Amino acid sequence: MKRVLMIITACFSMLITVGAQSGLHIAPLFEGKIIPQQRMVETRVKGKMLSKYQLTLFRSVRFNANTKQEIAHIHDLIELDKKQNQGRPYSENYSSKKSRSKETLMLQLSKADSHNRFLCYKRDNDEITVIYMEGTLNSLDTLRELIK
């Protein structure tokens, strides 16, 4: 009985984290629809471990892009999410650094339910990391302080 309950709980937990990025253009990346899951390193954290950071969910994927088209596709999806959130509260909260082979973007998205949402993108040559976070953390400035 305990095993069945644990399996049901794990499945329900996975469904909640899958829905967290819904409505975002970058969501298919987290679902393995753009880059196959076997090429990505995925990290998911929920619960008490995040509470000291004022977050309830942390989800990241990291992979090496095989082609320039993969880099461009991911970048375009991030830009679409950035544009989609312009004109909404907190949409002005983003920071960006870019050079020829390196790029970093931190974006505060519109709220979902009562959670603030953040999307971070980092490219270092062919290695790409995309991070989605949500919680009560209220600004990118606070987030920058946490990740220093």
Image (spheres, rainbow, N blue to C red):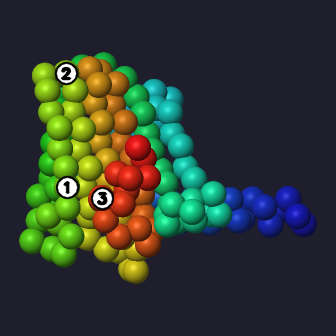
Residue 141's disc number: 3
Residue 41's disc number: none
Observer-nearest of 7 and 46: 46
Kindly check if marks 1 and 3 are in contact, taking CB atoms under 8 A apart as contact.
Answer: no
Q: CA distance from mark 1 to mark 2?
A: 20 Å
Whether residue 95 is situated above or below residue 4 in the rendered picture: above
State the image coordinates of residue 143 (x, y, percent, origin top left).
37, 56
State the image coordinates of residue 91 (x, y, percent, origin top left).
17, 66
| Farthest right residue in view | 1
Whether residue 8 is situated above or below residue 80 in the rendered picture: below
According to the picture, the residue beneath numbered tag 2 turns out to be: 101
Residue at (19% x, 50% y) in the render: 95
Give the quadrant of the C terminus.
top left
N-terminal label among 1 and 2? 1
Residue 94's disc number: 1
N-terminal label among 1 and 3? 1
Q: CA distance from mark 3 to mark 2?
A: 25 Å
Residue 139 sits in quarter: bottom left
Q: What's the residue type where badge 3 is placed?
A: Asp
